[in-house]
Every structure is written in structure tokens, then in C-alpha cells.
């Protein structure tokens, strides 16, 4: 059932319609096959780029879509409702464009942004390391200054789109402590950079998540984004925006699970009536609908603050926490609504439930979101 969205402009309405068309014609027919076989959907990101759906929240002058964040997130939600793995990779691409857009020099922007925002090159974001996830300041991958640039040594972990993306936001240590980290934009074909085998994950099977290994890899100084030591500030401010993308993905998943559960409950009968007409189940579906609507409201509130130029870090963490917990609960309840069939791969709800779990973990676990919110409360 298409969500009846309150959109700010006719252009936004057209964009949502375009997204639904692309998602229904290009994504929906192949999602099951790729998720089951764990194969990468070649060509899908090029199609999304040609449709102008890859860099919506960035300025048109640089090749972006010039859309408010509240519109971009609703597009992402529509994509996630058909294929969460693709939506996550779109969100990560957007995240990976942020450092150059917000902290790059005019020269760096002119050189790389049009290709990145036009969909010619796909981006990935590599902050996490095997021993440093939540505690990002503990990262150890090292960039040593040499003539003309840096020599990088160390390992990064858990990179969405790793080994396939064309460029990588690399956060590496150039000094001591949390102010000793710098941000680089590293092309995939850098000598000395290699990628591990894709992780064997619970879900999001079609887009690989890999480690990256830097072995005396040379990164020219012109590829450092921002000042030396500014890396963690760049990483965290990018994540404020990225978290909203994950919140939107979670709502898309929850909406898809709700739709499937409602459709099933209207058809399936037990004790002489449709299961949706048993109040115990009808109320479960009502709670699911309330959770989806209120989760959407939290990300829209944060996005509208961002669009208005207001602080939104706390609201972004609230949105990520609320939306991803809602997605976990709603997708689990959707399996319950389908009874035994919900536990099989014949229906999509089991996939939604597996996919919802990761939204509570990446781009800051929900414990870390609580940490951010409580720090705001503590002043
Ligand atoms: C499929 C997938 C894709 C990913 N994609 C990317 C990506 O593209 N780029 C990237 O950089 N990273 C990515 N990640 C990494 C992800 O962001 C981290 O896994 C996440 O931040 C948690 O880090 P960790 O796994 O090291 O867990 P840890 O930090 O070791 O945490 C373990 C547990 O301890 C809890 N914990 C830790 N510190 C605290 C605290 N202070 N208070 C309370 N509880 C705490 C955590 O909430 C968690 O429950 C991805 C991960 C996965 C699984």
C-alpha cells in the first residue's frame, strides 16, 4: 500500500513517484534472487544514478538533486521498502560525499564532486576498525606524513560496498588522541590498498561488507579533506546526517513488513473469520502502524530542523534510536502475524526481520545514540 505522504512541493511528489516506478520496475523483480544467492546487483546503482536518485540532498550546481533532506529521506524510505541493502548503500554513498561537500577546498570539490554526485563514482565510508567501532577515537590505522602526501598502514573493518565502491572516506591517525585523526578521500585503485572477503552476514546479502587493508599505501596530500587532526569532527558531523538515512531505511523496512502483515491478515482465516478481525491480532497490527507512523515523524522532525539550518544532532540520534527499535519490533511482529509461514523464506517478512537488526547496530549502536542524547541532556 503506497504511503500517503505530506510532501512540500510538486517536484517532491514527482520524485517520489519516479522512485516508486524505478523501485517497482528495477528493484522489486530481482531483490529476492540476489538476497538469496548473495550476489551483487550489477547495474542497479548506475540505474539509480541515471534516475538522479543517488545524491538528492546535495546542490544542483555540483550535480546533486538540490532536494531538502526531508524529501531525500522519504525517497530512501521508498527504496528501502523494496530493497534495504540497496537503500543502505545509497545512504552510505550520500554519507561518503559529505566530507568533501562540507570540508573540502574549492579545488577538491571542482575536481571530484561532480562525478561523485552525478553517480559516476560510488562512495564508501571507512571509520570502523576491528578493535574500534563505538570507540572510534581508538582507531589505529596510521597515515605517516612523507614528501607529497602520506603512507598509510593498517586495517579498516565493516565497509559497506567495500571492494566495489570507487572511493573511500578513510579516517586515519596522523597524531595522538582524538585530535590526531585526519580524513582522506582514497580511490579504490590505490596501490597498497586491498579488500578482505565479504563478511557472512545475517542480512543485506546483496551488497558486500568487507575489511580494507592498507600496506604502505601512498595517498597524496591533495586527497586529505579538511585540516590535519580534523578527521573525527568530520566523521561525526557526517554521521549526524547519515544516521537520518538509517532511520529512513528502518522506517521503509517497517512499512514493508506492516503492509505484508496487513495483506496477509485480511486473507487468512481462523476460527471462522479473517485473522485481522480477531481483536488480539487487529490491535497488534494497530500498534505496528502506530510505531511506523511515529518513527517516520521522528526522522522528518530532525530532517526539517536540518533543512531549516537548526541544530539537529540530538534529534538525529532520537530518530535513529526510535526508528530502528520500531523496525525491529514491527518486523518481528510481522513474522508473528504470518504464523508458521512467517518463519519461512516463502515470505519476505523473515528477511525484513533479519535486515532490521543491523539498523540498531551500524552508524552508532543504539547504546551510542542514548549516549549522544544523554550528553545533550547533561549539557
Ligand atoms: C553490516 C555492517 C555494515 C557496516 N558498515 C560500516 C561502514 O560502511 N563504515 C564503517 O565505518 N563501519 C561500518 N560498520 C561498523 C559499525 O558501525 C560498527 O559495527 C558499530 O559502530 C559497532 O561497533 P563494534 O561492532 O566494534 O561494537 P563495539 O563498539 O565493540 O560494541 C559492542 C557492544 O558494546 C556496546 N557499547 C560500546 N560502548 C558502549 C558505551 N560507551 N556505553 C554502552 N554500550 C556500549 C555497543 O552498543 C555494543 O552493543 C558496519 C557494520 C556492519 C555489521
Image: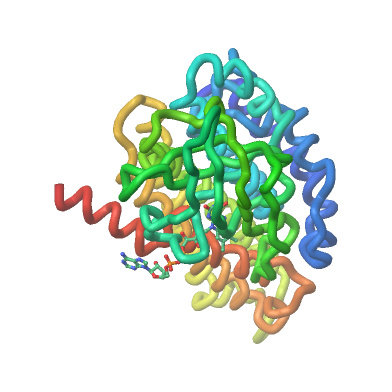
Q: Residue 84, located in which quarter of the rendered image?
A: bottom right
Between 346 and 190, the one lying in front of the other is 190
Q: Residue 75, located in which quarter of the rendered image?
A: top right
Q: Residue furthest left?
A: 379
Q: Position of residue 207 (x, y in %)?
A: 71, 55
Q: Position of residue 206 (x, y in %)?
A: 75, 58
Q: Position of residue 155 (x, y in %)?
A: 56, 57
14 lies left or right of 376: right
288 lies left or right of 261: left
Q: Is residue 101 visible?
A: yes
72 lies left or right of 177: right
Q: Residue 237, located in which quarter of the rendered image?
A: top left
Is 30 drawn above or below residue 272 in the view shown?
above
Residue at point 63%, 23% (across, down): 112
Q: Position of residue 64 (x, y in %)?
A: 61, 23
Is 172 drawn above or below residue 290 in the view shown?
above
Amino acid at each position: 500500500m503506497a504511503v500517503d505522504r505530506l510532501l512540500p512541493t510538486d517536484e517532491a511528489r514527482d520524485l517520489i513517484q519516479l522512485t516508486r516506478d524505478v523501485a517497482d520496475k528495477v528493484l522489486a523483480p530481482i531483490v529476492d534472487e540476489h538476497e538469496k544467492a548473495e550476489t551483487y546487483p550489477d547495474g542497479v546503482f548506475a540505474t539509480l544514478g541515471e534516475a538522479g536518485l543517488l545524491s538528492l540532498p546535495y546542490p544542483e550546481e555540483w550535480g546533486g538533486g538540490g532536494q531538502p533532506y526531508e524529501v531525500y529521506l522519504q525517497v530512501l524510505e521508498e527504496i528501502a521498502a523494496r530493497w534495504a541493502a540497496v537503500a543502505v548503500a545509497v545512504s552510505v554513498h550520500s554519507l561518503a560525499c559529505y566530507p568533501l561537500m562540507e570540508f573540502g577546498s574549492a579545488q577538491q570539490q571542482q575536481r571530484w564532486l561532480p562525478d561523485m554526485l552525478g553517480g559516476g563514482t560510488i562512495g564508501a565510508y571507512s571509520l570502523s576498525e576491528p578493535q574500534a567501532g563505538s570507540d572510534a577515537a581508538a582507531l589505529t590505522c596510521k597515515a605517516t606524513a612523507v614528501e607529497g602526501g602520506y603512507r598509510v598502514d593498517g586495517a579498516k573493518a565493516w565497509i559497506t560496498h567495500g571492494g566495489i565502491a570507487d572511493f573511500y572516506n578513510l579516517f586515519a591517525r596522523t597524531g595522538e588522541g582524538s585530535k590526531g585523526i585526519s580524513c582522506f578521500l582514497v580511490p579504490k585503485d590505490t596501490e597498497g590498498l586491498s579488500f578482505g572477503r565479504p563478511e557472512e552476514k545475517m542480512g543485506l546479502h546483496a551488497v558486500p561488507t568487507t575489511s580494507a587493508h592498507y600496506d604502505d599505501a601512498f595517498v597524496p596530500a591533495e586527497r586529505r579533506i579538511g585540516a590535519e587532526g580534523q578527521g573525527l569532527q568530520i566523521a561525526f558531523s557526517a554521521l549526524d546526517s547519515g544516521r537520518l538515512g538509517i532511520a529512513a531505511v528502518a522506517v521503509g523496512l517497517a512499512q514493508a513488513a506492516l503492509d505484508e502483515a496487513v495483506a496477509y491478515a485480511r486473507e487468512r482465516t481462523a476460527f471462522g473469520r479473517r485473522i485481522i478481525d480477531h481483536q488480539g491480532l487487529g490491535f497488534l497490527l494497530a500498534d505496528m502502524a502506530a510505531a511506523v507512523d511515529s518513527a517516520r515523524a521522528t526522522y522528518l522532525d530532525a530532517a526539517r530542523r536540518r533543512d531549516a539550518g537548526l541544530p539537529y544532532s540530538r534529534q538525529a540520534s532520537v530518530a535513529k534510536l526510535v526508528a530502528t527499535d520500531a523496525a525491529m519490533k514491527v518486523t518481528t511482529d510481522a513474522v508473528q502475524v504470518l504464523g508458521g509461514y512467517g518463519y519461512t523464506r516463502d515470505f519476505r517478512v523473515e528477511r525484513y526481520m533479519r535486515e532490521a537488526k543491523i539498523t540498531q547496530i551500524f552508524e552508532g549502536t543504539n547504546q551510542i545514540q542514548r549516549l549522544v542524547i544523554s550528553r545533550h541532556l547533561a549539557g
